[in-house]
Image (cartoon, grey):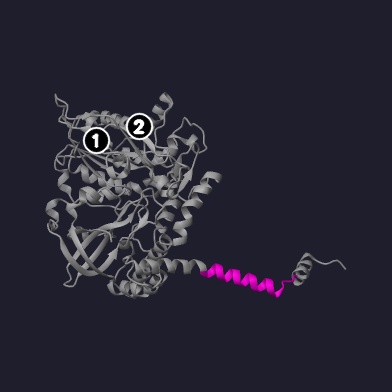
């Protein structure tokens, strides 16, 4: 009688024989593999403890045992009924689990030892990048959210907006996917002050150089399918939308030159300068700026700089990797006639709100020189004073929040240029932010002296997982209270050179003993780095004194 396939499989499996010796060897190998990694990790942590680099000999994995106390802290601090308290406690617990997983992965000895060489080997032989940094042709790297903007669904599709609104982090209240209400509200607030808004959504390198990723030179702009609807809505509200994409595409076609850095997300300096020149022409056509002065306010000098792109650093290929070479570019620092570096002027008629595209050749910490960024080039082309507020990342809300804290900068402003990466339309958070008049809000106290602080963490902003964002440094925010109940906001480096700091592991309920210095004393140095803000929908925390804590 013929047997069925199931009967034949059962017969073959039933006659499989494994000798006792082989079985014991397999079990032993599995057990050794299972315990070797945590034992190696603990040995490294004990060595760090004996060297005074850790505060406890217990394994870092034991830190998860404090998670219930974090949940209890969230319960005790939350307001409302039992359901609201439960949701708050659950949010704190999920946040703590995320912090624990990130720090455990970041501090893994095996991970840090093998990750770089393994990624370098895979990139060299297989052309494999990472989850967020993808390898294109000719040594070019691309940021995945940039690609998502062009090839993803329309960012204004109702289903996309609904999904993004539900898809925020469980412990975050910031879920505002539609950019239109925020931009229109911002423009209306500026209009009440007789200020014109000019939006500059800056294109990605994949839109200008699709051929470097595997596509073809496309005569049509590679905008998201919702772009036209988005622009029509803003123009109907008398908002000027300046799209740099045609300028960059025209330069590429005419000169056959690269408009973006190969291993970074940002534009090359000459491309940025061309966009600044075209934007200056648009601003002059608005007829709201004064005539140019008879004598030039600014001059430029050429200088070569060499740096390594943020996407390359984001891949964390390890020291000594030669797979991708540093890039050398020529920047044009903007100087006063007596050759002093350009400085933003808070009394200027033009205010630039920008992100890392504005900072890339302006902020020295980014590795490609200084005094030659987007705001500087705009000032040179206009030959007018220009003010600037620029923060790396979160262009959808970061600079608006910063401006809301200091609306005095708008006293003489007639044009606000809001530059932001176009990917913010598909991935950014767009809350409504009120620009209160200075008389509407008491002036927050400004600390002038360093203090010794001992208190408790009430809330923490957390930081991104290293390697998932195109920047290697990030400032975190802490809300803390001392023993007398006085509350302050503390900024500190949470991620440095793609490594988490001790501050990133702080959680609500932890006790702090720190030496703090006023934030204003270090704002020039750290103010343009990406800063992860605390959830503060009512802007209650902006009235608190702010300090800086050096990472331990």
- Residue 235 falls in which quadrant of the image? top left
In the image, is 112 to the left or to the right of 17?
A: left
Of 89 and 99, the residue lying toward us: 99
Which one is nearer the viewer's eye here, 178 or 26? 26
- Which quarter of the figure is the N terminus placed in? bottom right
Front-lying residue, 105 or 239: 105
Q: Which mark, residue 376?
A: 1
- Say left or right for 32 vs 264: right
- Residue 217 image label: none
Mark 2 = which residue?
A: 271
**Disc on the earlier residue, 2 or 1:** 2
Q: Is residue 269 above or below residue 119?
A: above
Location of residue 72 with respect to 158 vertically, above or below: below
Location of residue 218 in the rendering, given as x and y in whole percent from the top left corner: 48, 32
Instruction: Based on the picture, tell me whether residue 233 belongs to the magenta stretch.
Output: no
Highlighted range, magenta:
16-35
- Viewer can see residue 551: yes
Q: Nearer the viewer, residue 231 or 353?
A: 353
């Amino acid at each position: 009688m013929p047997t069925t396939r199931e009967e034949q499989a059962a017969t073959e499996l039933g006659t499989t024989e494994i000798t006792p010796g082989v079985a014991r060897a397999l079990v032993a190998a599995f057990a050794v593999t299972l315990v070797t990694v945590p034992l190696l990790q603990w040995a490294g942590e004990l060595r760090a403890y004996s060297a005074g680099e850790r505060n406890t000999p217990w394994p870092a994995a034991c830190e998860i045992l404090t998670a219930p106390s974090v949940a209890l802290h969230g319960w005790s601090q939350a307001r409302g009924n039992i359901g609201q308290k439960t949701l708050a406690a659950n949010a704190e617990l999920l946040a703590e689990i995320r912090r624990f997983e990130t720090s455990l992965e970041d501090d893994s000895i095996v991970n840090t030892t093998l990750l770089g060489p393994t990624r370098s080997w895979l990139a060299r032989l297989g052309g494999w990048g990472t989850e967020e940094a993808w390898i294109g042709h000719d040594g070019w790297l691309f940021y995945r959210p940039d690609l998502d903007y062009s090839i993803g669904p329309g960012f204004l599709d109702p289903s996309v907006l609904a999904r993004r609104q539900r898809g925020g982090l469980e412990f975050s209240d910031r879920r505002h996917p539609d950019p239109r209400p925020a931009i229109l509200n911002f423009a209306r607030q500026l209009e009440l002050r007789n200020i014109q808004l000019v939006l500059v959504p800056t294109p990605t390198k994949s839109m200008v150089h699709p051929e470097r990723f595997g596509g073809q030179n496309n005569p049509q702009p590679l905008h998201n399918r919702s772009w036209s609807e988005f622009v029509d809505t803003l123009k109907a509200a008398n908002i000027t939308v300046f799209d740099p994409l045609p300028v960059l595409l025209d330069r590429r076609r005419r000169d056959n030159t690269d408009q973006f850095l190969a291993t970074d997300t940002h534009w090359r300096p000459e491309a940025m300068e061309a966009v600044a020149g075209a934007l200056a022409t648009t601003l002059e056509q608005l007829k709201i700026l004064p005539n140019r002065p008879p004598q030039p306010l600014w001059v430029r000098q050429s200088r070569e700089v060499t740096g390594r792109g943020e996407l390359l650093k984001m891949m964390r290929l390890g020291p000594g990797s030669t797979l991708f070479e540093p890039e050398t570019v020529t920047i044009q620092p903007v100087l006063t006639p007596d050759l002093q570096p350009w400085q933003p002027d808070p009394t200027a008629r033009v205010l630039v709100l920008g992100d890392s595209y504005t900072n890339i050749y302006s902020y020295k910490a980014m590795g490609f020189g200084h005094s030659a960024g987007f705001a500087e080039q705009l000032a040179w082309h206009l030959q007018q004073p220009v003010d600037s507020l620029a923060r790396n990342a979160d262009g959808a809300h970061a600079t608006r929040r910063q401006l809301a804290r200091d609306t005095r900068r708008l006293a003489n402003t007639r044009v606000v240029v809001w530059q932001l990466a176009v990917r913010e339309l598909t991935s950014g958070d767009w809350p409504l932010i009120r620009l209160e008049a200075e008389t509407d809000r008491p002036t927050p106290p400004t600390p002038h002296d360093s203090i010794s602080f001992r208190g408790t963490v009430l809330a923490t902003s957390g930081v991104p997982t290293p390697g998932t964002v195109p920047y290697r440094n990030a400032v975190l925010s802490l809300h803390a209270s001392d023993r007398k109940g006085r509350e302050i906001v503390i900024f500190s480096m949470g991620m440095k050179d793609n490594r988490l700091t001790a501050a990133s592991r702080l959680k609500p309920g932890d006790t702090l003993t720190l030496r703090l210095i006023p934030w204003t004393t270090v704002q020039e140095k750290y103010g343009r780095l990406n800063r992860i803000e605390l959830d503060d929908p009512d802007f209650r925390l902006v009235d608190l004194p702010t300090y800086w804590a050096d990472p331990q």
